[in-house]
Image (spheres, helix red, strand yellow):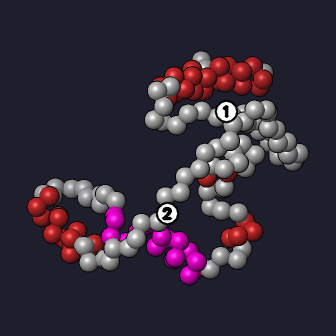
Amino acid sequence: MAAAFEAHPYHRPTVGWMSDLNYFSANDAEEILRQILRAGEHGPSPVSGDVKAEQVMPILEKYFGRLPMSQKPDETTTTEPPQNSERRVELIEQTQPLYLEGYHRPDYRSKDDAVYDAITDLMSEGRTSVFTVLWCAIKK
């Protein structure tokens, strides 16, 4: 992913770089969690079972309503520069072979999103997909 993206957050690994994690403290994690979750701006609270909203809402307000509000974090966005040539990374390891190929596509708000979803399904879903047929041919 680091080779595929230069500016987009996908460039960074989900759990972070190992070199950062080796020096990361519990206080650092707590501060980041505080920034991400922004006390007072809670997402949906899942409640299941045979309950009524008028019974649950006072309980949610009691426990979550007293948490202080904080400022929203900066919503800085960036634009991924265009990729005008192939980027290739090859790792030589003594493990099971793995081939990955990826393409940049517009995000879910694009008018072309459904087209890309259909291409993905045709290429990779089900026993007759292009990738499944190719994989079976390679294994034989």
The reply to whether residue 76 is visible in this rendering is yes
Q: Residues within 10 Å of mark 1 (few under 14, many from 20)?
A: few
Which residue does the numbered mark 2 point to in the structure image? 74
Residue 53 locus on image (x, y percent): 14, 58
Please indicate whether residue 85 sits to the left or right of residue 109 in the image. Answer: right
2 or 1: mark nearer the eye: 2
Q: Amino acid at mark 2?
A: Asp
Residue at horizontal 79%, vertical 38%?
Answer: 87
Which residue does the numbered mark 1 point to in the structure image? 103
Q: Which residues are magenta?
A: 27-42
Please tell me whether mark 2 sits on a helix, a strand or a loop.
loop
Quadrant for residue 60, please give it: bottom left
Give the label on residue 113, or none.
none
For this rendering, which residue is in front, 119 or 6?
6
Please indicate whether residue 13 sits to the left or right of residue 64 in the image. Answer: right
Residue 74 locus on image (x, y percent): 49, 63
Residue at horizontal 72%, vertical 21%?
Answer: 134
Q: Residues within 10 Å of mark 2 (few under 14, many from 20)?
A: few
Quadrant for residue 120, please give it: top right
- Quadrant where the C terminus sits is top right
Please indicate whether residue 20 sits to the left or right of residue 120 in the image. Answer: right
The reply to whether residue 121 is visible in this rendering is no
Instruction: Report if residue 31 lies within the magenta region.
Output: yes
Please tell me whether mark 1 sits on a helix, a strand or a loop.
loop
Residue 4 locus on image (x, y percent): 72, 42
Distance CA(mark 2)–CA(mark 1): 29 Å
2 or 1: tag closer to the N-terminus: 2
Examine the rendered structure and indicate whether residue 72 appears above or below residue 14.
below
Residue 17 locus on image (x, y percent): 70, 63
Residue at horizontal 75%, vertical 68%?
Answer: 19
Query: Main SS of the magenta segment?
Result: helix
